[in-house]
Image (tube, rainbow, N blue to C red):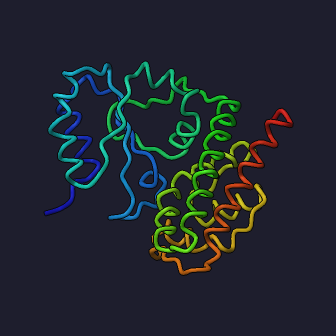
Amino acid sequence: MAKMTVEQLAQDLEKALGRRLVTLLLYGSAARGHHIPDRSDVNTLLICDAVDESLFVQLEVPVRAWVRAGQPAPLILTESEWRSATDAFPIEYEDMREANRVLAGRDPWSGITVQREHVRRQLEHEVMGKLVQVRRAYAALRGEPKRMAEVLVDTAGGFFAMLRGALRLAGKTPPRTPDELVRMAGTTLGFDTAALAPLVAHVSGVQTLKLNTGDALPAAYVAALASTAAYVNRLEREGK
């Protein structure tokens, strides 16, 4: 039996919700063109006229089928929430705007603006949080390469999103492919990219990440996070 497609999800949601559906948006790796089947999620955002119990009743059948197909349920926002949350999720909005596809409903981007300071502030908070988290894991798991590899894989999506955010703050357009993104980020933010190659290969679907004791990747990953945090903090000090 063929796997459920995102187009089928769109048809099912349009049928279930009717005029209540404002927009169904595809974003993430599937919209960027480097989705890896059976590894990457197919990420969707559902914008509705309102969110109430009757909406969840209407969503139950199509969303359950989508989740059973191995995909995450859509993010759900009201149209009002979508228009007012740019200051809460500026990095996510910029990522979505840069690579998205409207699957159903109307284009949601008219009138949506993201302020640079909101991006910088969120990025500062998230990069420092990720840096502390990964340093803690590295201290605990330095002698357990299999578990450390799991940490790197679990945090890679957020790391790459942070690199895109930092490059936008630097006035650059983030490349879509992971290898080009890391290369530009390393040059701009000041970290060595050579040892990150196994993680880039994993994210690109070339090979599954496996670590051996003493591999350079974990230390290079921590260093890249530290350089990104230092760059963002420097922007704050310089008032940029």
Q: How many numbered callouts?
A: 0
Residue 46 in picture, x, y percent from top left:
34, 34
Q: In this view, does 27 lie to the left or right of 37?
A: right
Locate the C terminus by quadrant: top right
Q: Nearer the viewer, residue 8 or 226?
A: 226
Residue 107 in picture, x, y percent from top left:
43, 31
Q: Which residue lies furthest to the right in this view?
A: 238
Residue 178 in picture, x, y percent from top left:
57, 63
Q: In which quarter of the image is residue 140?
A: bottom right
Q: Which of 88 and 150 is in front in this view?
A: 150
Q: Is residue 41 left or right of residue 19?
A: right
What residue lies at 51% left-to-right and 55% top-to-bottom?
A: 157
Q: Which of 199 and 225 is in front in this view?
A: 225
Q: In the image, is residue 219 above or below residue 98?
A: below
Q: In which quarter of the image is residue 138?
A: bottom right
Locate the N terminus by quadrant: bottom left
Q: Using the rendered image of the protein, determine whether residue 160 is visible from the camera's viewpoint.
A: no
Q: Is residue 72 left or right of residue 213?
A: left
Q: Is residue 28 left or right of residue 175?
A: left
Residue 143 in picture, x, y percent from top left:
55, 74
What residue lies at 80% left-to-right and 40% top-to-bottom?
A: 235
What residue lies at 62% left-to-right and 58% top-to-bottom?
A: 135
What residue lies at 24% left-to-right and 44% top-to-bottom?
A: 9
Q: Using the rendered image of the protein, determine whether residue 103 is visible from the camera's viewpoint.
A: yes
